[in-house]
Image (tube, helix red, strand yellow):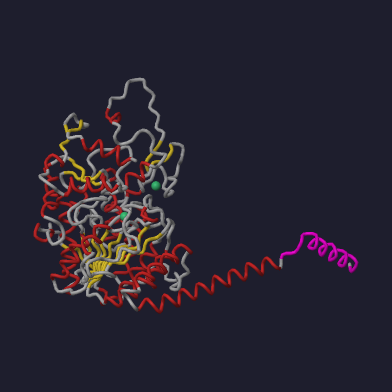
Amino acid sequence: MVVETLDSSCDGSKRKHANGGEETHLDELSNGDTGVSSSKRARVSRGEMTFQDIYGADALLNEEDEEDDSDWEPVLQNTPVEFVKWCCVNCTMANPGDMVHCYICGEHKESGILRYGYLASPFFKDTGLTEVEEKCGGSSSATSSTAVGFDERMLLHSEFEVKAQPHPERPDRLRAIAASLATAGVFPGRCLPIHAREITKQELQMVHTSEHVDAVNITSQLLYSYFTTDTYANEYSARAARLAAGLCADLATEIYSGRVKNGFALVRPPGHHAGIKHAMGFCLHNNAAVAALVAQAAGARKVLIVDWDVHHGNGTQEIFEQNKSVLYISLHRHEGGNFYPGTGAADEVGTNGAEGYCVNVPWSCGGVGDKDYIYAFQHVVLPIASQFSPDFVIVSAGFDAARGDPLGCCDVTPAGYSRMTQMLGDICGGKMLVILEGGYNLRSISSSATAVIKVLLGENPENDDLPIATTPSKAGLETVLDVMNIQMKFWPSLATAYSNLLSEWETRLIENKKNQVKRKLVRVPTWWKWGRKKFMYRFLSARI
Ligand SMILES: [Zn+2]
Ligand SMILES: [Zn+2]
């Protein structure tokens, strides 16, 4: 397992660094049981996977892995350098050198995706800038009812080490979405910008332990550090995390108070894996949890969090699993616990009197698409949300279940995301805050986030002809029925729907079997068919 390889390297207290200096690990600096050391120990003891495992399993990631320092050794003169692979700028996956298009997302080897947009990569400043700026006009409508939270300082959070394969949670994610919004004239233009503010320690302590908050803050004194093998920090990460949480908190207040109708938090680092006292899975502070508790401090009694990131939000579940005033509903790949982070089975329903206030829809395989998600929304998310009757809705909006995502490998389209947004928009008068979580294919996350914000602005969902009544895949149907069966103990409104769906699908199954039997019955021997054809031929020939 890559975990062991990477952990063993992280356990060394000092490590030779590219510039000849040495990296000091957080484990040395942390006193007692900080989030850094405890999370790492807990993760290793549970044998959990990391996102790096997925990469490690990739045969295309050859011996040139991140622990190999040979990158930094001077290349001997006359030594032939052979570039056998390239990393896709759109999704970061490694490709064989002879391929022209990325085998995961289809992006061209010489992709110019970051050359356009007003927040395009600084490496491509020369192209595309003027055209987009002219389109935006640089004006923000103060009367807009949709707010967007963004601050360029969150782009400074990046992995310090330059690796053969870039970390998927990278600043280009925000650049790409911002460029897409600007090109579409959505933001700046039609949305109200929210002034960025760093969240206070007191606010963070509503969600996290004081030790965890300190552990994140201390990273600003280090050149770079790791909470887990795949959760990095540089000297700017703590501020980025405070800005992300601060933007989510202020958006929650603005929306709940009615000063704006709804909002989108274009933030990173993401948050839904961050638990009470640990950072993990690229997440430092739990932005959705902070927003939920800030909304409650502003007066919201009941908050619904819908998490459609392809990974289970184990951090958010941990924070609220004993809390009846926050209903957490997550749709994610699970595969019997074999998909990161391994939690989120259907029978994890909440604890200590809050049973039923945690709803997990755990897909049993990859490739899940619009129809399964919309089916689950129709039969699980909306009925439960309607019975819960929240005052405020938060969406943990990872776009890594999107078509073409290198980690999620699912098939949700921008039309699917916009339809789900519309479906949630009818709850509690549309007081909804959408918070960016994961999503690593730049084209997918840009188009999906843009589609979602357009719906927040009041536009109809993309591909409005996407059928409302969808037919799920067999695996999707089984998952939805399983969840309904478990949750109807807590949400009685599901019971009738469950028995109706069950009988409907049993009838369909019986009909299918009957049709198969009929098809078998009408099968005739080949000699008979040929005989008939010969007879027809003779008959017709005679007539002609
Ligand atoms: Zn790609
Ligand atoms: Zn994710």
* Residue 131 visible within the image: no
Which region shows up in magenta?
523-543
**Coordinates of residue 235 in the picture (x, y in percent):** 15, 44
Confirm whether the magenta stretch covers residue 527.
yes
Q: Foreground: 37 or 55?
A: 37
Q: Residue at x 11, y 51 (%)?
A: 211
Q: Foreground: 90 or 534?
A: 534
Q: Residue at x 22, y 40 (%)?
A: 160
**Coordinates of residue 273 in the picture (x, y in percent):** 25, 55
Quarter of the image that includes the N terminus = top left
**Coordinates of residue 192 in the picture (x, y in percent):** 21, 66
Q: Foreground: 158 or 357?
A: 357
Question: Ligand 2 is found in which quarter of the picture?
Answer: bottom left
* Residue 356 visible within the image: yes
Confirm whether the magenta stretch covers residue 56.
no
Q: Residue at x 8, y 60 (%)?
A: 202
**Coordinates of residue 264 in the picture (x, y in percent):** 25, 64
Side (left or right) of 401 relative to 512 = left
Quarter of the image that includes the C terminus = bottom right
